[in-house]
Amino acid sequence: MPVQVTKKERETSQNLVHRFTKTVRQSGILLELRKNRFFKRAKSDLANKRSALNRVVKKAEKIMADKLAKPK
C-alpha cells in the first residue's frame, strides 16, 4: 500500500515533509525494508549437523583446556 500525502491549503513544504515522514514511520514500511535488506540463505540439514558437531567438539576441548590449566 503506497503512502500518499497531499498538500493542504496554505501548508508549507516543511510541514508537508514532516507529515509525510510521520505517515511513513507509522505505516511500518521502513521497518519491513530494513528487515528484508539482507537475505540470508537457510542452511542445509548436513551443514546444521556439522556446525552442531563442531560446537560439541569445541566445548569439550575448552573444558579439557580449563581442567589442564587449573592449579591443584
Image (cartoon, rainbow, N blue to C red):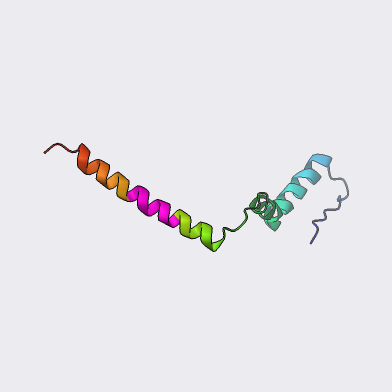
- Quarter of the C terminus within the rendering: top left
Q: Where's residue 61, x and y in %?
A: 31, 46
- Taking the image as shown, residue 30 lies to the left or right of residue 53, namely right
Q: Where's residue 13, x and y in %?
A: 83, 41
User: Residue shown at 50%/59% (left/top)?
Assistant: 48
Q: Is residue 53 magenta?
A: yes
- Front residue (pair 71, 21): 71
User: Residue shown at 59%/58% (left/top)?
Assistant: 42
Question: What type of secondary structure mainly makes up the magenta span?
Answer: helix
- Taking the image as shown, residue 30 lies to the left or right of residue 1, namely left
User: Residue shown at 24%/42% (left/top)?
Assistant: 66
- Front residue (pair 56, 19): 56
Q: Where's residue 55, x and y in %?
A: 40, 52
Instruction: Please report the bounds of the magenta region as a residue range.
Output: 52-59
User: Residue shown at 36%/48% (left/top)?
Assistant: 58
- Label count reads 0
- Taking the image as shown, residue 50 lies to the left or right of residue 10, namely left
- Front residue (pair 37, 23): 37
